[in-house]
Image: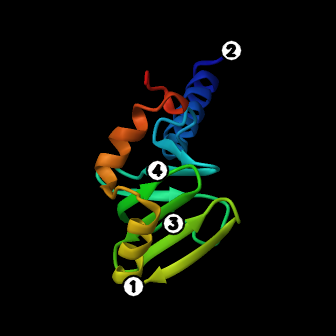
Amino acid sequence: MSTRLIQAILLTLCAAICGSCDQDPFGLAERRIAGPYTLSQLDGVRYGIEGPLRSSLKDLLVHQLAWNGKWIIAHVAGEGWFVIDLTRRKDTGPISEDEARRKLEELQLELHSAEQAWRLLAQEPRNGGKT
């Protein structure tokens, strides 16, 4: 094989590897919240929620969230509050802060910053944690 061909192959491989760096093939930048929804670490300090419903908040910055096996409530920067009912596969939002606070109280959900939620989700067995 000629040196030029080897260089071309190596250059192509490097480009392919660098071009796929944002793809996260091992899932290290996402943690499952509940159901099919995941919290994604966008760049180490910003977080988004990904899921199948209209309220997929991947491209929006999630500041706070609360969850259990049936509900996710998230505060999104500049957008408001979103409520995801996993049982009925229905999402609502944006809703007012008062509505969100009432829902949090009704469901007895504890609100966490996105960074706190990221750490808590890491502890859950489904995300590789030991508890």
Q: Amino acid at mark 4?
A: Ser
Q: Position of residue 53 (x, y in %)?
A: 66, 67
Sequence-first disc among 4 and 2: 2
Name which quarter of the figure residue 129 lies in.
top left
Farthest residue to the top: give it: 1
For the residue labelled by badge 1, is the local secondary structure a helix, a strand or a loop? loop
Label 4 sits on a secondary structure element that is strand
Q: Secondary structure at mark 2?
A: loop
Q: Earlier in the sequence, mark 4 or mark 3?
A: 4
Residue 29 in view of the camera: yes
Residue located beneath label 1 in the image: 96
Mark closer to the observer (1, 2): 1
Residue type at numbered disc 2: Met
Q: Depth check: 52 or 104 in front?
A: 104
Disc 2 crowd rating (10 Å Cα; few below 14, some 14-19, many 20+) is: few
Q: Residue at x 51, y 27 (%)?
A: 125
Question: What residue is shown with label 2?
Answer: 1
Relative to residue 20, is residue 78 drawn left or right? left
Few, some or many C-alpha atoms within 10 Å of disc 3 (few <14, some 14-19, many ≥20)? many
The image quadrant where one finds the C terminus is top left
Q: x, y percentage for residue 105?
A: 38, 67
Marking on residue 40: 4
Q: Are marks 1 and 2 in contact (CB under 8 Å)?
A: no
The residue labelled by disc 3 is: 57
Residue drawn at (51%, 66%), measured in percent from left and top?
57
Q: Is residue 106 left or right of residue 114?
A: right
In-front residue for pair 95/49: 95
- Residue at x-position 64% and y-position 50%: 36
Q: Is residue 40 above or below residue 65?
A: above
